[in-house]
Structure formats: C-alpha cells, structure tokens
Amino acid sequence: MPKPGVFFFATYFHEDRHGDLEDVVARFTADATVRDEDVMNRGHDAVGAWKTKSPTVYSYTSEPLAVTTTGDQTIVTSHLVGDFPGNPLDLRYLFTLRDSKIAALEIQP
C-alpha cells in the first residue's frame, strides 16, 4: 500500500480548519497518541476531546507551509495566527503513520 502523500495532510488540515471532528478523529488509529503543549492524549476519545478543546482555548488559523519526510515521520510546518501567546508562530506537526492512519502526532514549536 502506498504511503499517504501531501493530499492526506492537506485534507487533515482542511478538515481540522472546518471543524469536521468526526473526519479528523477517523484519520487516527484507535490507539493513536497526540502530544500537544506537553500533554499526551491516547486513543480516539482522548484525541476527540483534544480536538474539541483546542478551539475553546485559542482562536487561530493554521496554514501549512512545507511537508518533509524523514524515515517513518512526516513533518508539516504550519504558520499559525491567532489570540495565543507568541502569536504568530510556526509549528511543526510530526506525524507517524500506520496503515494510512495517524498513529502518532507531536506538535512542536
């Protein structure tokens, strides 16, 4: 099975931007992990709660700028603008995929 390409990640960011929670969560494996702001979320329920909470804490837009692949990790650099400390800033989304789904995501400055 071919690895997901740029379209996979563009679709993820599009669904995230437009609040398609079920579609976003469906992109993750059942045991996926997400590390954001030093908090670890594990599994669909935790990923869904993380995605639901994010827009209630900060209002922001995210525009992907670059995609690179290193080993089994795909790194998407995205420019964020919003009402959060350090605005604006670029974040790195480190995706690890398994069976064409997100098995791990770590968001770093």
Image (cartoon, rainbow, N blue to C red):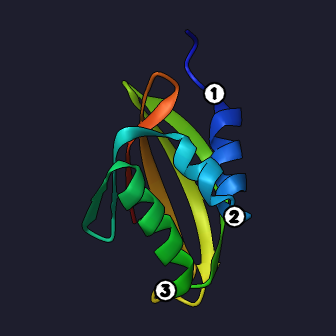
Residue furthest toward the top? 1
Mark 3 packing: few (<14 Cα in 10 Å), some, or many (20+)?
few
Residue under label 1: 5
Q: Residue at x 34, y 49 (%)?
A: 43
Check residue 57 in the rendering and tell me which mark sits there, or answer none.
3
Q: Say which amino acid is labelled 3.
A: Val
Q: Is residue 107 visible?
A: no
- 50 versus 77 height, above or below: below
Q: Residue at x 35, y 43 (%)?
A: 32
Q: Are marks 3 and 1 in contact (CB under 8 Å)?
A: no
Dot in front, 2 or 1: 2
Residue under label 2: 17
Q: Secondary structure at mark 3?
A: helix
- 58 versus 102 height, above or below: below
Estimate the x, y position of residue 16 in percent, counting from the top left.
Answer: 64, 59
Dot in front, 3 or 1: 3
Real-space Cα separation, disc 3 to disc 1, in angstroms: 31 Å
Question: Where does the N terminus fall, quadrant-wise?
Answer: top right
Q: Residue at x 70, y 44 (%)?
A: 11
